[in-house]
Amino acid sequence: MEKDNYDILEHELVPKHVVLSKEESKKLLKRLKVKPYNLPWIRASDPVCKRIGAKPGSIIKIIRKSPTAGITVYYRFVIPG
Amino acid sequence: MEETEYVIKTIKFGILSPEHIKKMSVVTITVPDTYDEEWVPIPFGLMDRRLGTLEPLQRCETCGERMEQCPGHFGRIELARPVIHIGFIKYITMILQTTCSECGRILLDDNSIRRYKDYYLRFKNKKLHYFATLINNIVVKKASQASKCPHCKATKLKIKFERPFSIIEEMNGESKILTPYEVHDRLKKIPDEDVELLGFDPVYARPEWAVLFTLPVPPISIRPSITLETGERSEDDLTHKLGDIVRTNEKLKQSIESGSPQLIIDEHWNLLQFHVATYFDNEIAGLSQSVHRSGRPLKTFAQRLKGKEGRFRSNLSGKRVDFSARTVISPDPFISINEVGVPYDVAMRLTVPEKVTQWNIDRLKEAVRKGPNELGGANYVIRPDGRQIDLRFVKDRNVLADQLEPGYIVERHLMDGDLVIFNRQPSLHRISIMAHQVKCLPGKTLRINPMVCPPYNADFDGDEMNLFVPQDSEARSEMETIMKVEKQMLTPRYGGMIIGALHDYITSAYILTKKDTKLSRFIASYILGLAGYREPIELSNEIKGREIFSKLLPNIDFEGKPLAVFNEEDKKLVIKAGRILSGVIDHNAIGDQKAHTLLHKIYLTFGPEFTKDFIDKLGKLLIGYLDHYGFSIGLDEEDLPDEAYANINEAIRKHLKKVDEYIEMYRKGLLEREPGATVEETLEQKIMDELNLARDEAGKIAEKYFNQDNSILITAKTGARGKMLNLFHMAACIGQQSLRGKRITRGYENRTLPHFKKGDISPYARGFIKSNYKKGLSPLEFFFHAISGREGLVDTAVRTSQSGYMQRRLINALLDVYVEYDGTVRDAEGNIIQFLYGEDGIDPTYSFGQEPVDLDSIIKDELEK
């Protein structure tokens, strides 16, 4: 498994991932007026999810670089699998 | 007739149960024939009178209604042996693979079943159907792996589907075909709860119903027989197919009753299965198609629905509509860009329903008096009681006109100013469909202003366009506010003006605004008058063209770079307070399909209506001026002095010599390999580069000898039409021809043509054309030129079909994606796709290049205030 102990978050192509707290998630869903499953999904088995410890049901925030907007924020709902 | 409005809430698909089929059937069909000698339907035949009626006066034997009212009734065929429904065979195999052949339970232990069931119901109750199907899929995947039934401990045998319609069970390496009877028995054993967990609704689709014991016979209104002009009658394909089924069924019945050997029975049974399968779908893989007497494959149910000519794409998505017109288009530069010229004949067929009110009663009375055959008349009058009166058959229209009062509806002819929808296929973007104002004109073609060609991508080499007349004010108001041409002048692709001056307009603008253009008072007032300019002008006989152009400009400041730079002074276009101070007007100022032009700035500053009027006036002025000026292109424009040709030849010779040197170096093995390429590739590249240089240099030399008032030079430099390269092709040198991006190498063995030595890789042997179009090509050059020309034609043909299909797929995938008011991008179910449209939330229509706003010019404008 961890052959060379490389931290994938260090890689330049992996954007910043943050697990949202309960309150933050609630606020986000209220702002967008959606149910969690209306958000884009990410599997709990995704390497990044495993690395940052995101469990099914939580929402993660992805902060990416964007060619048009500079920095852009994306959210994903963690699903089992 | 009573009309009731229903709203469709849900559509549920299921399998017809045998009971249901029996309940809705009115007759059992046992005779495979249709009519007797006197064309009377045979009772119990496929055209039995109880199935409905086709003749206008005949009454249906089941419901007693006439053709218009009787919807037709189903019959049935009682199959002597059951057959499998071909459309469900994949699901049947799947269910048999996941359930026990002995006890019928899902091959999972009770605990798992309970757990999955729990999940399934929870998702289903929350209407999360996607998740529910996920559970179904997991159950199927898990259960199909079992080798033993956890409930009754029976061993699970492998079940396979074999084309076209057999289900095979493998036992100790031996395989056995399951008969429909066996399949039915197994499916029947499965309890309702387990059926549900496999993704079926046991109320509407019990799996065993997919094994057919009775086959419904559709009413004859679904498969009408047609009488040809010769008096011959011909039956629908479905009737033919049903005939086959009944015939084999009766034969099968007979052979069973007469105790025929099993082999014979099986043969008939198999044939029955074939006929029933092709009755549903005549394009099953691994099955021969069922054909008509003439050898044409029958069109059965699946073929009726599938594909481009099927019910969905052809009849439901592609319905033909009334109040529409289609003809050839032609240009009319004297109508506004938001107008469309409609021929009188068309205007008198298309109508708009107008309610009579006290304000329009006089006009509508006049329309009724004029009647259906005079422009500005009317075709129908609808009385308040709903009776429609056809004006063609009214004896005295004056009487009817006098009867008109508020509450009547008059279907009056199309008239000037009516809003209509105008469209040209392929409708690739929203500006392929725009609203225009009608202008009734004589002639037989639809007329558009040439400046609206770019959004439609239209030209006048025979293009046809469609016109639709909206019938209510709601549609009209929507068109008025968002669809009119002037509201669609910015393209959502890059935020520039898609509508603007093109071709002659630009030539004219350049010639008019050239530094030294001076006009007489007479011609100046003539073209300004055309443009609708009504102010007094200077009494000079030498009015500068720029001044005339400036008279149309609003009070605006603009700075730009003209495309055409003929002298140093005009390097910059400067407009201050609506007057041209320096520079010329060309494609970079008023051109189409361009952002940050003068037109673009006028649009952003003064809005759509003003810009539309400005473009209209501009168009008339420029066309008027060019008419007067008399712009044309002649053969002598490509002529160069002998000195020029000598220089060009010298330049080309120089580069050809260089190529020869490269080839010599390669032969001697002295050529250095470029990184990532072989020596041969390096050589090719070097030759290509050198030959391109030769062509460019020839062009550059030619350019020096062109006059500033050379017509082609003007059109190319101002961006009106053509590129400088086209001029060089005509006057100097055509250059290297290519095939698939390489020099031409194909043909004979190691040579392109038998005129060359084998292995000759010199420029002339590989498609270099030294000549120009003016001088003419040598036969060999002409051949190479034709190769390249053909490649271009093939490429465009291939590209359009491929990109058309890609566009179709994309539109079908993205059609319900929209930007919500909060800036997020969502699909029809409310799922979020982007959290901010395009990651920056910018609508490119109103953006400035890559930036949301043109900060620089805003700051500049503010500072100057």
Image: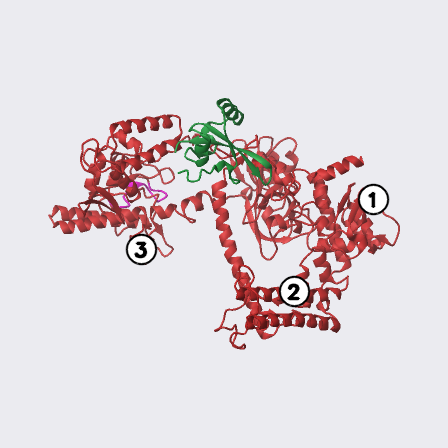
Chain colours: A green, B red
Q: CA distance from mark 1 to mark 3?
A: 78 Å
User: Is label 2 or label 1 in front?
Assistant: 2
Tell me whether marks 2 and 1 sit on the same chain: yes
The amino acid marked with disc number 1 is: Glu
- Marks 2 and 1, the one that precedes in the sequence: 1
Protein chain holding label 1: B
Tell me where residue B223 appears, x and y as whole percent.
Answer: 34, 46
Do tags 2 and 3 sit on the same chain?
A: yes
Mark 2 residue crowding within 10 angstroms, few (<14) / some (14–19) / many (20+): some
Q: Which mark is residue B489?
A: none
Q: Secondary structure at mark 1?
A: loop
Q: Give me the C-alpha separation between circle 2 and circle 3.
A: 65 Å
Against B426, is B692 above or below?
A: below
Q: Is A18 or B636 nearer to us in this picture?
A: A18
Asked if the magenta segment contains residue B656, the reply would be: no
Answer whether residue B47 is magenta in the image: yes
Q: Is residue B337 visible?
A: yes
Q: Is residue B366 above or below residue B341?
A: above
Element type at mark 3:
loop
Quadrant (top left, top right, bottom left, bottom right) of the C terminus of chain B: top right
Categorize mark 3 by other alpha carbons within 10 Å: few (<14), some (14-19), many (20+).
few
Query: Which residue was labeled with disc 3?
Result: B292
On the image, numbered disc 2 is attached to which residue? B693
Give percent across and percent down for residue B296.
34, 56
Percent across and percent down for residue B143 are 27, 36
